[in-house]
């Protein structure tokens, strides 16, 4: 009875240790999981130690013990299978399979990437978003003592807007004890274009997050529901109604035991209720944006670019080997988030052969053959324009500006605040424009492209029309430092824009004067090309020259 009791206690102790390890480490029960193999090896080692202790064997008996040999044989077999599986799963013997994991299509830049209006350009990087989020949280007196902002700040498309979202988290274990019954009451949402920061309060608190403990911890909650799934990097998103979800991609191993990782499934977990829905990756809802992490996509493209002629060539000869540049950014295209990064030769020169866009939901990848500067070179060029201010460039965002691939860069001061913006032409990175606002920067960049022959003034095909009538209204304005007169004439609702530089005699006209105007139609006003039958003046006439229109209008009439 004592022996049986001792054995039972030993078994129970081992089971308790296994249970504690599983509850804390949360390994997936899956042969593709490295943690499972380590766990099995530790179990065998523990069995060997218990066997030796139970038998109380001498050194000679240890060498001759059949039971111990069996246990050690199992341990050795586990090590051999693990090492063999690692080798047979590696690119060393599977270069072709790794190279074919990612399908890459050639893209057309101007067709695939539309020009964005200024209110859609993401102006903030993750660090700037973090500053805004913390500042917003600091102003919430009722929450700041109990909660902090999580560091996630996932970039997503929300109602066709580029935003970053991040949940709050409990400030400490004590704060969890006092607030866990109600859950986390809100999340931070930051518009990347307008920089508007909002604390979105929920009707019911989130009870399944990374900062929760025990069974409500999101990782433990997922493990107990899906014990065999090996999850990739989780991301926090909100659906079109603003409901918070955890997007939980499930790894798929395509090569051997441990190699060729892609995403096979995705689990959506409601952060409020804990309800989960399991989808095959091709059936995942379109509103989710981050099934594939940026790091995984970059890794897959590096396999594609470096293993075209086998593993040995990727190490020694390196013929036709390409790799991604250091760093990446995100681009919103057709309601999806795409990872952008440059592509350069594996020798690491200072120029790109092109760039790739990789869809974080579908893994769709497009390569654009546009030779030009690396992102690091563009950042240096932008910093050089403001070197006296010591501003630091953020990683570029790739934009389509008038059909030209253009790096858009925010320039930040030592406090991490965005002070200026820069645009750098990808192919001719000596063309750099800097401005205090995005519109100012774009205008300067556009002028530089005209000056360098990259961009040509479009041919004006508008027909010249004419009208003769008395002036009914006249007003003055200044555009880009140049004076303009805006007039209206009898019998027409159109507004006619008269440049003082081109038609100095306009200052002589008053309401009621008859004029003959030749003009071209515009969106808001018509551009005058001839006034009173005279062609545009090349230079201002003499000040004493009288115009047919009459005397100079009084201040009241202007």
Image (spheres, rainbow, N blue to C red):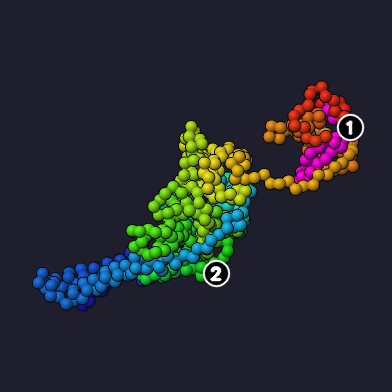
- Left or right of 209 in this view: 474: right
Q: Any mark on residue 513, and which? A: 1
The location of residue 242, given as percent across then percent down, is 59, 57
Left/right placement of residue 63 relative to residue 93 reads: left
- The one nearer the camera, 37 or 362, is 362
Tell me where residue 45 appears, x and y as whole percent: 23, 68
- Please name the residue shown 79% across and 24% down the image: 542
In this view, 494 is above or below 317: above
* Tag 2 residue: 283
Residue 513 belongs to magenta span: yes
Is 260 in the magenta?
no
In the drawing, does residue 458 fall left or right of residue 532? left
Residue range highlighted in magenta: 508-533
Can residue 194 be spotted in the picture? no
Quadrant of res 140: top right
Q: Is 268 placed above or below 412 here?
A: below
- From the top left corner, tell me how far across and down residue 416 is, in percent: 49, 40
Q: Nearer the viewer, residue 202 or 435?
A: 435
């Amino acid at each position: 009875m004592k022996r049986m009791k001792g054995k039972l206690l030993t078994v129970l102790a081992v089971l308790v240790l296994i249970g504690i390890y599983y509850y804390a480490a949360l390994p997936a029960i899956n042969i593709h999981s490295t943690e499972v193999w380590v766990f099995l090896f530790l179990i065998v080692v523990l069995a060997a130690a218990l066997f030796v202790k139970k038998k109380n064997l001498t050194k000679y008996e240890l060498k001759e013990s059949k039971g111990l040999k069996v246990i050690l044989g199992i341990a050795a077999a586990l090590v051999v299978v693990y090492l063999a599986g690692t080798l047979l799963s590696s690119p060393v013997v599977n270069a072709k399979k790794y190279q074919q994991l990612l399908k890459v299509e050639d893209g057309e830049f101007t067709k695939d990437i539309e020009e964005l209006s200024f209110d859609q350009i993401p102006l903030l990087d993750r660090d700037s978003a973090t500053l805004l989020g913390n500042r917003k949280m600091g102003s919430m007196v009722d929450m700041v003592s109990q909660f902090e902002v999580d560091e996630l700040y996932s970039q997503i498309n929300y109602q066709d807007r580029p935003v970053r979202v991040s949940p709050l988290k409990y400030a400490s274990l004590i704060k969890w004890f006092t607030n866990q019954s109600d859950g986390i009451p809100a999340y931070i949402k930051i518009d990347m274009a307008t920089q508007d920061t909002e604390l979105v309060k929920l009707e019911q608190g989130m009870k399944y997050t990374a900062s929760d403990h025990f069974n409500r911890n999101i990782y433990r909650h997922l493990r107990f529901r899906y014990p065999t799934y090996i999850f990739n990097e989780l991301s926090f998103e909100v659906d079109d109604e603003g409901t918070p979800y955890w997007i939980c991609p499930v790894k798929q191993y395509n090569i051997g035991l441990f190699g060729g990782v892609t995403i096979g499934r995705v689990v959506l977990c409601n952060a409020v209720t804990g309800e989960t829905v399991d989808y095959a990756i091709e059936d995942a809802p379109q509103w989710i944006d981050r099934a594939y992490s940026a790091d995984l996509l970059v890794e897959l493209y590096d396999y594609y670019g470096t293993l075209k002629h086998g593993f040995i060539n990727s190490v020694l000869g390196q013929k036709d080997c390409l790799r991604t540049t250091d760093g990446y950014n995100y681009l919103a295209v057709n309601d999806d988030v795409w990872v952008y990064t440059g592509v350069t030769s594996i020798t690491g020169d200072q120029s790109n052969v092109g760039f790739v866009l990789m869809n974080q939901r579908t893994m769709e990848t497009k390569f654009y053959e546009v030779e030009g500067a690396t992102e690091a070179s563009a950042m240096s060029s932008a910093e050089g324009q403001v070197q006296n201010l010591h501003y630091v460039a953020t990683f570029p965002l790739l934009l389509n500006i008038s059909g030209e691939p253009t790096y858009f860069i925010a320039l930040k001061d030592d406090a991490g605040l965005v002070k200026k913006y820069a645009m750098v032409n990808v192919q001719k990175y000596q063309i750099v424009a800097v401005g205090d606002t995005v519109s100012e920067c774009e205008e300067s960049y556009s002028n530089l492209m005209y000056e360098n022959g990259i961009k040509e003034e479009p041919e004006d095909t508008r027909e010249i029309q004419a009208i003769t009538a008395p002036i009914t209204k006249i007003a003055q304005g200044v555009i880009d430092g140049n004076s303009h007169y805006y007039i209206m004439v009898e019998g027409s609702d159109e507004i006619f824009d008269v440049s003082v530089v081109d038609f100095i005699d306009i200052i002589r006209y008053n309401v009621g004067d008859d004029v003959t105007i030749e003009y071209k139609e515009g969106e808001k006003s018509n551009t005058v090309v001839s006034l009173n039958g005279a062609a545009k003046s090349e230079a201002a006439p003499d000040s004493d020259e009288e115009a047919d229109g009459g005397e100079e209008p009084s201040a009241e009439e202007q």
